[in-house]
Each structure stands twice: as C-alpha cells, then as structure tokens.
Amino acid sequence: MEIFELISYKDLLDILGASLFVYSVLYFLRITKGIQILKGLILLALIWALASLLDLRTVSTIFEKLWTVGLFSLVVIFQPEIRKALSKLGQATKLTSSKPLEERIVERIVRACAFMSERQIGALIVIERNQNLEPLLEGCVTIDAVVSVELLITIFDPLTPLHDGAVVIRGDRIAYASCVLPLSKSSEIPRKYGTRHRAGLGISEESDAIAVIVSEETGEISVAVGGKFHRNLDQELLKSLLLKELGINL
C-alpha cells in the first residue's frame, strides 16, 4: 500500500505516455521493414555491450563514432515511412473545408470518364475526401473551377499542356490539374499498368483519397482506394462504387 501512496497521478500519466510511445514505435516497426533492422540493431548493441564489458577499446570507439551516423542512416532508410506517418498525423487534425461531393458531381466525373474511355484518352482524377492532399502533391497548376464534363475532357486532351498529370477534385470544384503524385512501390501492380496507375494507387495508399484512372492504352477504367484496385469498371459500376465510397445515399 505504501508503494501506491508514493505514486502520483503525474507518475501514472508519465508511465502511460511512455507506454504509448513505445507501443507506437513497435507497431511502426512491425508494419514496415524496420523489424528486421531493429533485430540487427539489437545484435550490434549486444556486441557493443560485450566489447565494453571486455574493455575492447578499439571496437567500443568504433561503435561510439558510428552511433551518430547510424541515427542519420535510419532517418534516410525510413524516409518514405516517416513522411507517410507525419502526413497522416497532420491530416488527422486538418480537415478540408470543402463541401462534400453530391451525386451530380459524381455523374459528371462518370460521364467524363466514360467519354475518355471510349476514345482511349488517359486520365487520372483524384477525389479528395477528409484528408487535405496538398502535402502530397507537386507541380500542380491551380484551376479552382466548377467540375464539368467538358472541362475534365479538355484538361486530359493530349493536345493540351495540362493533360500529363492528375486532376484533384475538392468538393464541387476542380482544385488542381497536372499534379505529380507519389508513386506506389507495390510489386502486385500488373506489368501492363504504367505510371498513371502507380500514381493513382500511390495517392490512395498515403491518403483517404479516391483515384479514378482511365488507361490510355486500353480505355479500361479503374479505381484505386485504400491501396487497392477496382478494375474493368463500366459506367454503372464506376458510379455505384464512387457513390458508395463517398457515402452518398440515393
């Protein structure tokens, strides 16, 4: 009982905070390649401890000098995972202020994709949901125009300067065009899919956005959401999937 009397609420909060931190680090390592690296670091730490215990000065000095370099190396190795984690942490507290999509906007997106699919015009349309995508976008051209079938088709026309990149839709407006997106490194993407599909899958892996891709080679319509592809969609299936993912009730 005396032990409990010596522990204050601050001590409990301190223990809880430390436990959550350790759990988060271990969880992060488990879902990345870091678990193998962690095992290697533990082995090196044991060797270092043994060298210090046996008073092997040269080996101990080498480990001491490599400590700083090792920390820098970890940052470089985990750079993609760190960026993804920080991005999601920021998005958790930063919500978009745009209005949610309505069925009429989905209809326009579907009609534009159907038109481009028939004519094998490549397209990549990213629909922003709760997470603000700006930290993940590069090289964008600001559009800020109401979503329309004609404008979407015009942007992706191969003869226009904005066709090579992604369009980002925020609410009922086309926010950006010609955006460069993070590419997925998944080995499960079929070889027939190129950069456009990797970009669509990549943005869906790093955010809650929905990416609609029209293949320039085949005209096939795909949707990437949550790091997964929905392939070979016709006009009705595309509309149904978008309405479902966007939570639009008919």
Image (cartoon, helix red, strand yellow):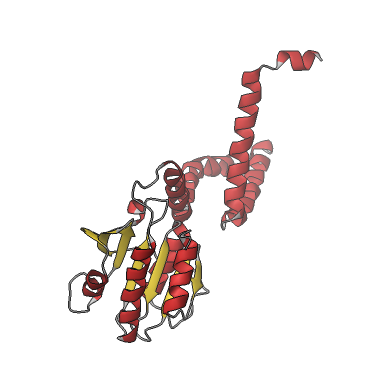
Residue 54 location in percent, x, y? 68, 39
Location of residue 80 with respect to 86 vertically, above or below:
below
Most foreground residue, 42 or 88: 88
Question: In which quadrant of the rendered view does residue 138 lie?
Answer: bottom left
Q: Is residue 59 left or right of residue 155?
A: right
Residue ID at (33%, 50%): 98
Residue 132 location in percent, x, y? 37, 50
- Check the picture and name the quadrant holding the N terminus: top right
Q: How many marks?
A: 0
Q: Is residue 32 left or right of residue 55?
A: left
Residue furthest front in the image: 250
Residue ID at (48%, 58%): 247
Residue furthest right in the image: 1
Residue 67 location in percent, x, y? 51, 42
Question: In which quadrant of the rendered view does residue 115 lie?
Answer: bottom left
Most foreground residue, 209 or 146: 146
Q: Is residue 213 visible?
A: yes
Q: Is residue 163 visible?
A: no
Residue 235 location in percent, x, y? 41, 78
Residue ID at (49%, 49%): 74
Location of residue 216 with respect to 75 vertically, above or below:
below
Residue furthest left in the image: 160
